[in-house]
Image: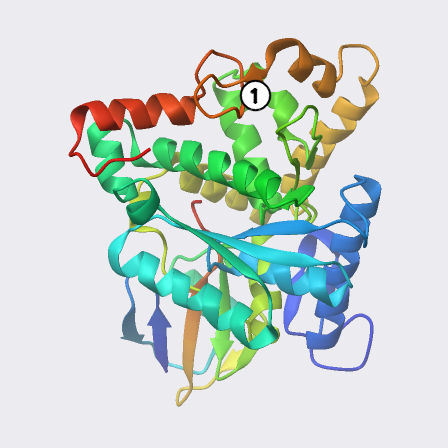
Amino acid sequence: MRCRKCPNRAVLGIPRHHTAFCKTCLTEFVCDQVERAIKEEQMFTRTDRVLVAVSGGKDSLSLLDILRRLGYEGDAFYVDLGIGEYSRQSKAKVEGYTRPRGIALRTHELKEDEGAGINDLADLVRRPTCSVCGTLKRYHFNRTAVELGYNVLATGHNLDDEASRLLGNVLHWQTEYLDKQGPTLPASLEGFAKKVKPLYRLAEREIAAYAIVNKIDYIVEECPNSKGAKMLLYKDILNRLEAESPGTKQTFYWGFLAKQKAEEGARPSMTENDRAVLHPCVTCGQPTTADTCSYCKLMARAKQTGPATIRP
Amino acid sequence: MTVVLNHPVREVEVKGPKRVKDLLAELSLLPESVLVVRGDDLVTEDDTIRDEDRVEIRPVISGG
């Protein structure tokens, strides 16, 4: 297979775009898609301070790499979940990427700062580990970005992540979550960082290919807690559809975004909605719809049932 | 050929030569869910893997 842009050998075929690229043209294609996402969705500019949430996986490390290649200022933030060998390896990948490039890395250690790792916390509050993980990560991503003066928090969510999440929400008619499925969530009120997903135009496979051809050393191993996760099932189903009908994932997710855009103005904006229902948590001050935010509730429950080491 | 699979890491022997597309079909793997790496290089579905080659099949789907 030959590259469609130059005479070189292709390293990746992309059926959804009827194309194939060599290493150089693939890198160019990926960067162009990210730049387009940033501009079209008004994510940030080159003067913004962007905090990139990194896990040591292909998506977040590639995002950091692409942003810096495009001339954006991106620092890294890593949450150490305390999942034994998996966390040790993923942290080593993050440090292995950031240190030689002189990228500032902020870290939050659950075992040190909350007094227990994610699995122990989930056991204490009797909730699924992935749900507790989501609550903790969302909280610390936002809080760290705001406290350290970053006005934008970027995550490595890609087209497959967003399409599978949309499928899950639609299958269960969780329409209340659909508003928050866009690639840009505004900093609608004090205490909220703007949240962006610059990889939403790229399939997971394209990002993995970018990471491999650009020699980004990422953790291939899956989080042990993700075994049997519904998201993996939805991704598999969408990939089966994609194999039969290339472009299915982008039609599904981008089509949803286009419909959302077309309806803008017909109903209150996300900022208006947020301002109507959110106020500072009585314990930590972070925005929440209840008196106490879900993070503080979770930690209070863990403290009630757990050892004295549980904080805050 | 030696094929390195992940999750968990293991090796299987498959008779070559074989096109990547046919190798993936034989292993019941969806091309959209994996990449095939030979040495430091990615190979595409119409590339042929020789009997003496060693390739890694790298899953690209993560659950996070």
Q: Quadrant of the C terminus of chain A?
A: top left
Residue at the disc numbered 1: A177
Q: Is residue B2 left or right of residue A25?
A: left
Residue found at the very far bottom of the displayed protein: B52
Nearer the observer, A300 or B25: A300
Q: Quadrant of the N terminus of chain A?
A: bottom right
Residue that appears at 75% across and 57% down: A18
Three-letter code for the amino acid on which mark 1 is drawn: Tyr
Q: Is residue A75 above or below residue A1?
A: above
Q: Is residue A20 above or below residue A131?
A: below
Percent position of residue B58, x then y: 44, 66
Nearer the observer, A149 or A101: A149
Percent position of residue A101, x then y: 60, 74
Percent position of residue A279, x then y: 58, 15
Residue that appears at 40% across and 27% down: A295
* Local crowd size for mark 1, using a 10 Å CA cut-off: few (<14), some (14–19), many (≥20): few
Q: Is residue A216 above or below residue A70?
A: below
Specify the quadrant of the image occupied by residue A74: bottom right
Nearer the observer, A178 or B5: A178
Residue that appears at 35% across and 51% down: A223
Specify the quadrant of the image occupied by residue A232: top left
Chain under disc 1: A
Q: Secondary structure at mark 1?
A: helix
